[in-house]
Amino acid sequence: MRSGAPVQTIKKFDGGSNKKAGPVVSVKKLEEAAEPAALERVSTEVRQAIQKARLEKKMSQAELAKRINERPQVVQEYENGKAVPNQAVLAKMERVLGVKLRGKVGK
């Protein structure tokens, strides 16, 4: 119970501060890096194969997107060559369009 004795309190370093950890890479290293590596984009062959197969099946970009459970913007980016290739998305497109998009394209 309460005896009136003094209670000792210790403040923990950074205890209770709701701060997240800093960046993993130091700012100095980022500045020293030559230039960021460019991401690989969808090749021209893949873009053309997607568009050709989609048009042969008389599908719009929105219909293809719905059938592969992606947003229409994703299909548009693939056909415009702005998308970074994702193997899962390409596999879904291959299945729906019935054309090879990885490896030997268009077969």
Image: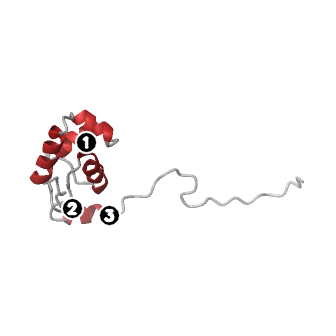
Q: Residue at x 23, y 41 (%)?
A: 75
* Mark before the other along the chain sequence, 1 or 3: 3
Q: Is residue 60 above or below residue 95?
A: above
Residue named by callout 3: 25
SS at badge 2: helix
SS at badge 1: helix
- Nearest the viewer among 50 and 53 is 53
Given contact means CB atoms under 8 Å apart, are the residues at marks 1 and 3 in contact?
A: no
Residue named by callout 2: 31
Q: Is residue 105 left or right of residue 86?
A: left
Picture coordinates of residue 51, whole percent (x, y): 14, 43
Q: Amino acid at mark 3?
A: Val
Q: Residue at x 23, y 49 (%)?
A: 98
Mark 1 → mark 3, Cα distance in angstroms: 31 Å
Q: How many marks?
A: 3
Picture coordinates of residue 5, whole percent (x, y): 84, 58
The circle on residue 74 is 1
- Nearest the viewer among 77 and 15 is 77
The circle on residue 12 is none
* Mark before the other along the chain sequence, 1 or 2: 2
